[in-house]
Amino acid sequence: MPLAFVTISRERLDFSCAIFDKDGQLIANAPHMPVHLGSMGESIRTVIDRNSAHMRPGDVYVLNDPYNGGTHLPDVTVVSPVYDDKGKE
């Protein structure tokens, strides 16, 4: 289901967006729902720790593990690494 059709996301803005550096440190975030950011960094660091050796441009990781930054099952963290034109971090 597209995000635009999910009422709680569309009308309540119940989602968070942020940019992290290659070490999982917060650089910038959208201001509308900062409550997720307390756990999002741990999720990012988990993805980096477990996958950095084989991350490639275009990869997408989905995580909702409560022991690694997740909060409760309906919340998921979607991580997509960003690279420059040469494929470097």
Image: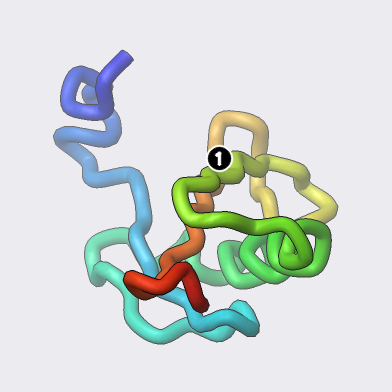
Taking the spot 60% from the left edge, 40% from the top edge, the residue there is 62
Taking the spot 52% from the left edge, 53% from the top edge, the residue there is 79
Whole-percent x, y for residue 78 in the image: 51, 46
Whole-percent x, y for residue 18 in the image: 38, 68
Residue 17 quadrant: bottom left
Whole-percent x, y for residue 67 in the image: 84, 53
The one nearer the camera, 32 or 47, is 47
The answer to whether 8 is drawn above or below residue 88 in the figure is above
Left or right: 35 in relation to 75: left
Taking the spot 77% from the left edge, 47% from the top edge, the residue there is 66
Left or right: 1 in relation to 12: right
- Look at label 1 and name its amino acid: Val
Left or right: 80 in relation to 12: right
Instruction: Give the tally of numbered discs.
Output: 1
Left or right: 60 in relation to 64: left
**SS at badge 1:** loop
| Residue underneath mark 1 | 76
Quadrant where the image shows the N terminus: top left
Query: 10 Å neighbourhood of mark 1: few (<14), some, or many (≥20)?
Result: some
Q: Identify the coloring.
A: rainbow
Query: Looking at this rendering, what residue extends furthest in the front direction?
Result: 86
Taking the spot 55% from the left edge, 40% from the top edge, the residue there is 76
Whole-percent x, y for residue 74 in the image: 56, 30
The one nearer the camera, 4 or 55, is 55
